[in-house]
Amino acid sequence: MTGQLSPPSVDQGTLYLIPVPLGPGDASAVLPAPACAQARALTHFVAENAKSARAFLKTLPVSVPLQQIEIQELNVHTPARVLPTLLTPLRAGFDLGLISEAGCPAVADPGSALVDLAHRENIRVKPLIGPSSLLLALMASGLNGQNFAFHGYLPSAPGEREKRLRELENESRQLHRCQMFIETPYRNLQMLTSLLKICSPTTRLCLAIDLTLPSECVLSREVSWWRRSVPVAIDRRPTVFLLQAGR
């Protein structure tokens, strides 16, 4: 016997997944009008950081005074036992917006746990269109968009990081897969150093930096090319790393 799905309760609100810009600037330049309009209409939010969320809402601007907007925080330090309380506005019939620090919420973002809980409570979840650094990087890389994997953050210890990079390159070679990962911006140079040390000269490496910002730069070249020179600064700049090994 299979379980039957029941529609979300009309007495509960909707959890809207609100995308935000990938960096400072005019939100309307990168967000579709419907996403901005929905964010303006909400009075309850969950965000990684309340201060930056208010700064984003101020740029829209929202339709009610910021002091009247409720923003609860959900980040890597939030205990799991707190998650059910974050859904309280939804149970009371209010719509709720989930905001990440940058880009799309719940992707490489602690908000995914809240989305999962909303599904378990049969609450409607509505994703809105906005910038995703991962998809933008893949689009611009020229690497395999038919077979790719995102691995989040790799180990920070040099030895463990280099071991993981060898594994990812071997897997890429065997499966013809584009491997994607990110790093805390202040460790970008260490990541690049490990990549150029470990990877084969023929492996394609793409750096997608400051996506959607005026300083945006995307370069996709073989490792042998990168070893001769790195013509772009990546220290402390948001960067998506992509590699694809030759067969």
Image (spheres, helix red, strand yellow):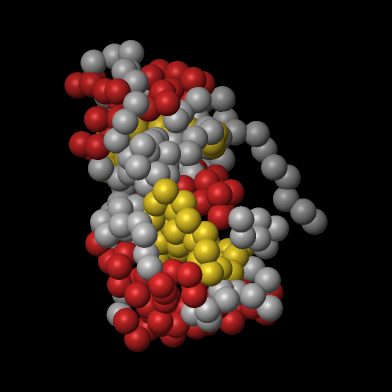
Can you name the residue that lies furthest to the right here?
1
Q: Position of residue 160 (x, y in %)?
A: 37, 83
Foreground of the two, 192 or 147: 192
Q: Is residue 123 left or right of residue 86?
A: right
Q: In the rendered view, tell whether residue 98 sits above or below residue 234.
A: above
Q: Horizontal and vertical percent for residue 162?
A: 40, 82
Q: Quadrant of the C terminus?
A: bottom right
Q: How many marks?
A: 0
Tell me which corner region of the image, top left, top right, bottom left or bottom right, holds residue 27.
top left
Question: Furthest residue to the top?
Answer: 63
User: Residue at left 72%, top 50%?
Assistant: 3
Residue 173 screen position, x and y as percent:
64, 78
Q: Is residue 177 above or below residue 107?
A: below
- Inspect this view and state whether residue 139 appears: yes
**Above or below, comparing residue 25 to residue 195 in the picture:** above
Give whichever of 89, 225 is nearer the camera. Answer: 225
Tell which of 239 and 224 is nearer to you: 224
Q: Quadrant of the N terminus?
A: bottom right
Residue in the picture at 51% in, 21% down: 34
Residue drawn at (40%, 44%), measured in percent from left and top?
216
Q: Is residue 181 left or right of residue 54?
A: right
Q: Is residue 115 visible?
A: no
Placement of 192 over or under 59, stated as above or below: below
> Which quadrant holds residue 156?
bottom left
Please tell me which residue is depicted at 26% across the width and 23% down the height of the picture.
58
Q: Is residue 58 left or right of residue 202?
A: left
Instruction: Please state which of residues 241 and 215 is positioned toward the viewer in this rendering.
Output: 215
Give the quadrant of residue 100. Answer: top left
| Rendered location of residue 64, percent (x, y) | 29, 14
